[in-house]
Image: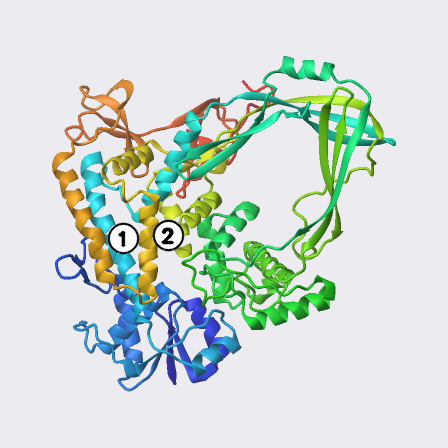
Amino acid sequence: MKLVLVESPTKAKTLQKFLGKKYRIEATFGHLRDLPKGELGVDVVNNFSPRYVIPRDKAKRVKELKALVKSDDTVILATDPDREGEAISYHMAVILSNKGAKITSEKIDADRFARITFHEITQEAIEEALTHPGVLNMPLVEAQQARRILDRLVGYELSPLLWKKLSRRWLSAGRVQSVAVRLIVEREREIEKFTKAEYWIIEAEFISTNQPVRAKLISKNDTKYESSETITLFDGTYTFTKTSITNKEAAAAIIANFTSPFTVSAVDKKEIKRNPAPPYTTSAMQIDAGRKLGFGAKRIMQLAQNLYEKGVITYHRTDSVNLSTKFLGVAKNYIEKTYGANYSQYRTYTTKSKLAQEAHEAIRPTDLTTRPEDVLSKDASFRGEHQKLYELIWKRALASQAAAAIFDSTTIAITSANHYVFQTQGSVVKFDGFLKITGWEEETQVIPNVAVGEIVSLNASFPQQKFTAPPPRYSEASLIKALEEDGIGRPSTYAPTITTIQDRQYVAKETKEDGRRGRNFLPTELGYLVNDFLVKHFSDIVELPFTANMEGALDEIAEGRREWVPVIAEFYSPFKEKLNFVTETVEKVEAPIEKTGEKCPECKIGDVIIKQGRFGKFMACSRFPECKFTKNVVEKIDMKCPKCSIGEVVVKKTKRGRVFYGCSRYPDCDFASWTKPVLAKGFV
């Protein structure tokens, strides 16, 4: 019997179903070796040699796997086809190559191990991989090791500096997380600096052969009312529009000046083609699912992991838009049979990113005949969330091989006797093409059939007050998009990065008026404090080009074009020098003290102040550590409990940080609400 090692027990069960009794499939349960916790674990003097240890919670599993393997057995390493998967296989091979409990050598008994990779867990893909086994890809292992060491050097050497200078022992810094926080902080400051300006637009309804036409005023005597302005942001530029109509009186004066007759002065008809989007990469899936389904990046990746390990979709960590030749043929046949031959269009896509791994495939269903409505029957563990994500993946992959949608677009201009020009645009779907698969996200405006020279009558005018809008805050989706466009991080890092910056309380989701948590990020006071310290003293680490260039260097290591030690050395030498300088010369940064105006109830001497802790704000004595008085901060909304009428309604948070409202008398009163309660009629 041959032993096959994978990282996940779910993946092991799926493989066992395909391979049968000839193989024994075992899971490592993730990484079996890692750098030690609580210490650097990297010898910075001797070529940054890592000191790997087997974590205590993995010792039992290592012992079990060693017992399964005889000295002459061939072990098939079948972990995921990426750097993490390659590293897990490497460490497993090292462990099994060393006899006894201790690992004394990094040498691998190469004859005993076969490496197989597959991008989908299907019978055909697995059998193909077993027919053509390979060896460990050491450049991939070294790239993963370089990233791990780099992040350890930044985290374990910079974080203690933050503890010391900012007086908070739970703070952390990292190459990707610190840049993500900076994006959010800089955006918030750009929003604060933005000056809103009032402007007005004017729309009018005209009647043509008893059919209404609604058009927007665009110009007078060839002078356009609307103009655009572009401002430079920390990350790119932002363009907004406004008009020269700055107040209600100006709009009213223009409307009063309209002079009949109103004549159709132009009718521009043309055919427009709209092509389908390419199949999903990891980041594109996270962005689209975040916007359409409202899922967080972490949840999206969990759902995709489930779908992959059950054999329903291809590998979900990819930055390629390639599709296999076999899938292209299957998609063509499926579309022609289901929708008609005129709906099929063979397409290939090119990944824009220079760093994409073109050998990988985009995310797609492993079997197109498993339609979205059928996926729940594939496995008892699947839920509605799995179905929703699978539907997006299924439609996107299939639609990428469908024909373009064709629209008849019409633009109409209407001119008054005194040269005011109104314009409207509408379109009619001539051929739905790929929209037959994906559905329509936008309603199409149909406008009447009019001719140049036709007289229309003005029925009503609609002046509308507007204000210029500042750049939007980042949501999970837009933050991922920004990180990807700037070349920061990789698809697999986005979800844990977003989780980390929230867990560290550097950012938080905005809270809406009804008490529900919104999608957009706001920096916290702590986020501002940490970001500003890093920008001032370690500006290169939180600059976009530096982080992007480092990712490029890691990719070159993975491709075997660079050695990992010089890459780390090039970074570490100036970093360590600056770290020592800041440690010795920069004074401790005192955070502003938020006073309550109360005396400490325990020592009667100190003042009660608000402090920021690992789990949020709390009250403490200003004489700490001499006086250790603490008390939770209770945020009230100035309302009696609608259930008991005695307690106060207070703001609370779940362990995951979701805001809800409860009674201050809990557990005596168990009132709780996800939404902000309002006063009932007659309630005093």
**Residue type pointed to by label 2:** Gly
Q: Which mark is residue 12?
A: none
**Residue type pointed to by label 1:** Asp
The residue sitting at 72% across, 65% down in the picture is 338
Q: Say what secondary structure mark 2 lies in.
A: loop
Instruction: Indicate the position of residue 582 as horizontal and vertical percent values.
Output: 16, 38
Quadrant assignment, res 141: bottom left
Task: From the viewer's perspective, tell me whether residue 435 is left or right of residue 466.
Answer: right
Q: Say what secondary structure mark 1 lies in.
A: helix
| Residue labelled with disc 2 | 489
* Picture quarter with the C terminus: top right
Of circles 1 and 2, the one toward us is 2
Task: From the viewer's perspective, tell me whether residue 567 is left or right of residue 243.
Answer: left
Badge 1: how crowded within 10 Å, few (<14), some, or many (20+)? some
| Residue labelled with disc 1 | 151
The residue sitting at 13% across, 61% down in the picture is 46
Can residue 219 be seen in this snapshot?
A: yes
Instruction: Indicate the position of residue 201 as horizontal and vertical percent values.
Output: 64, 24
Q: Is residue 17 above or below residue 37?
A: below
Of residues 392 and 601, which is closer to you in this image? Answer: 392
Badge 2: how crowded within 10 Å, few (<14), some, or many (20+)? many
